[in-house]
Each structure stands twice: as structure tokens, then as C-alpha cells.
Amino acid sequence: MSKQLMEVVLPRLARPLYKHLERFQTGKLNEAQFTERFESLLQRQHQWLSRRGISAARAAIAIHAAVLVLSMPGLRAEAGDANLPLEVIEHRAVREAALDVASSYGLSEHRIAHTIACLVAKYGD
């Protein structure tokens, strides 16, 4: 792939995610349906990347980072509700994502957290 991985993953996740989110917010989907569709979307994205030669771990890192970038408005709202700096909430989210990837692929949680944080910083607003 000639483009940066995140530049491919972000738009492929954003469009369907926002459609599902809009249907959830208007009451057309309940929380369980939204979660099921979101998980299915992530799995399809992971499979799509794998078919294009991206390693499973690299795909998982990119997908987790893209989800965090797309979740920035929610993270900001959470920070405001908790009266905490955005960086605290963002750090927690990055650590949770890194733990998930590390436990699934047997990689260094610290190194994955650093990679995800760098991607979020580069592609987040």
C-alpha cells in the first residue's frame, strides 16, 4: 500500500461508523445492535487489511488508533464530565487499546501504547 495505513483505515471506518452512530442516536438502533454492528465493522476492516498483506498486529494497532481518533469528541465530553484534562482520558484510552493489542498478539504493551499515541497525535484534530 502506497498510502499511510491510517490514511486508508480512517475513512473506511468513519463513514459506516457515523452512519451506525446516527442510527443509534435517532433510536433506530439500540446499544446492543450498535455494539454488534461496530464490532462487525472492525472485524471486516481487519480482514480487509489482512487480505492486502498487512500483518494482523499492525492492522489491529491501526484500527485501534483510528477508533481513538474518531472517538475524540466522546473523549472530550468524558473529560469535561469528569472535570479532567483531555490528556488523562486520552492516555487511559490509549493504554486500554494497547493492552488489548498486546494481549492478543503477545507484543510489548508499552511499545504499542507509544505507537498508538503517536498515530492519535498525528491524525487527531
Image (spheres, rainbow, N blue to C red):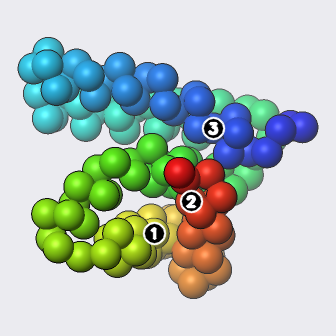
Q: Image quarter for residue 91?
A: bottom left
Kind of residue at badge 1: Val
Q: Position of residue 73 (x, y in %)?
A: 34, 48
Q: Which residue is mark 1?
A: 94
Residue 102, relative to residue 52: is it above or below?
below
Category of crowding for the residue at label 2, using alpha-carbon neighbours closer than 10 angstroms: few (below 14), some (14–19), many (at least 20): many
Residue extending farthest to the top is 28
Residue 76 against residue 17 in the figure, above or below:
below
Question: Element under label 2?
Answer: helix
* Left or right: 39, with 13 as reference point: left
Q: Tell me: residue 108, above or below residue 40.
A: below
Q: Which residue is mark 2?
A: 120
Q: CA distance from mark 2 to mark 1?
A: 9 Å
Residue under the point 51% across and 32% down: 13
Residue 9 is marked as 3
Which is in the foreground here, disc 2 or disc 1? 2
- Residue drawn 70% across the image and 35% down it: 8
Q: Nearer the viewer, residue 124 or 28?
A: 124
Mark count:
3
User: Label 1 near label 2: C-beta < 8 Å?
Assistant: yes
For the point 29% across and 50% down, the residue is 74
* Crowd tier of the residue under label 1, counting other residues whose Cα lies within 10 Å: few below 14, some 14–19, many 20 or above: many
How far across and how far down the image is residue 103, in percent? 48, 72
| Residue 36 % position (x, y) | 27, 33
Q: Label 1 vs label 3: CA separation?
A: 17 Å
Q: Position of residue 111 (x, y in %)?
A: 64, 80
Q: In the structure shown, which secondary structural element does the residue marked by tag 3 occupy?
A: helix
